[in-house]
Image (cartoon, grey):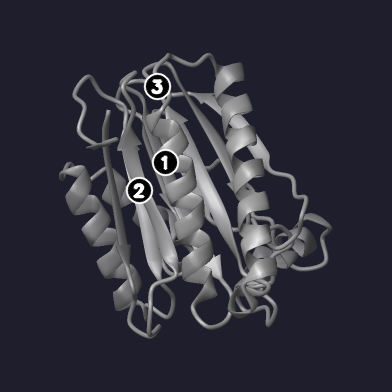
Amino acid sequence: MIAFFKTDQGMVRRNNEDNGGVFFNSAGNCLAIVADGMGGHNAGEVASQIAVSSIREEWCAVEKEFTPDQAEKWLRTQITAVNEKIFKHSQTHKECDGMGTTIVAAICTPLFATVVNIGDSRCYLLNENGFKQITEDHSLVNELIKTGQISREDAELHPRKNVLLKTVGTESVMDMDITTITFEEGDKLLLCSDGLSNKVSNDEMATILNDGTEVSEKTTTLIGLANKYGGEDNISLAIIEACIESRCEEC
């Protein structure tokens, strides 16, 4: 596998509340994470940092190959623990009251990828069948779309577009979506915060993922495009390509 993570403050925000990374463990498998923090007084930065550092620490201790069931169980356990940690931190640090973060993460092996998400950070898959979003946004506008109250076109301009129905750390208990997919040589996963998905179209993402450049260059191109279109939000993304070669930050 080849994997690369990149984050950018964007053109408007004063600080970057996103966090993430891509990490190999000793079993040779890769974990990718993107977390988009939220909360006043830069507390979102605290929430996303707690999430990524906590999950990375546990991932680096994994020394065995996972089955899909084991990968799903591991992610569920880690996200539940992180939710509790962030919630407790917000309760004991007044300046962090109400902070939380979205999370999208993927365990990638030579046979499969297991993806978890909470919030509106997304995971896309590019394979021989095309390019598609494989996570579902936990947002108000997505619920309105699903119930037929607004169209996807209306959602782009909806005044409550940024309202999330699920996040990590804002409640003592939360649930998450987890799915496992086949991940074969040549397939690519794109994990991103809404700073990218709100600005760059699916067609543009697919074109860049297919353009033959290095994975690291693709991340730079995608962030540059989001900034060209306004860059009103922080922008973070991870790209993982299934191949024989392995290039990723080691634990």
Q: Which residue does the image show at 61% across and 18% down from the upper left? A: 69
Q: Decide which of tag 1 and tag 3 comes sooner along the chain.
A: 1
Circle 1: element type: helix
Q: Decide which of tag 3 and tag 2 comes sooner along the chain.
A: 2
Is residue 148 positioned above or below 31 on the image? below
Q: Where is residue 85 drawn, in percent x and y?
A: 62, 53
Q: Are marks 2 and 1 in contact (CB under 8 Å)?
A: yes
Q: Is residue 25 toward the left or the right of residue 133 in the image?
A: left
Q: Which three-letter amino acid code belongs to the residue tagged 3?
A: Thr
Circle 3: element type: loop
Quadrant placement of the N terminus = top left
Circle 2: element type: strand
Residue bearing mark 2: 21
Residue bearing mark 3: 109
Residue 157 shows in the view: yes
Gap in Å between the C-alphas at discs 1 and 3? 16 Å
Q: Which three-letter amino acid code belongs to the residue tagged 1?
A: Arg
Gap in Å between the C-alphas at discs 3 and 2? 16 Å
Q: Where is residue 82 drawn, in percent x and y?
A: 59, 48
Is residue 87 positioned above or below 53 on the image? below
Residue bearing mark 1: 56
Q: Decide which of tag 2 and tag 1 comes sooner along the chain.
A: 2
Q: Is residue 214 toward the left or the right of residue 188 in the image?
A: left
Q: What is the quadrant of residue 95 in the picture?
A: bottom right
Between tags 3 and 2, which lies in front? 2
Q: Which residue does the image show at 65% across and 51% down from the upper left? A: 83
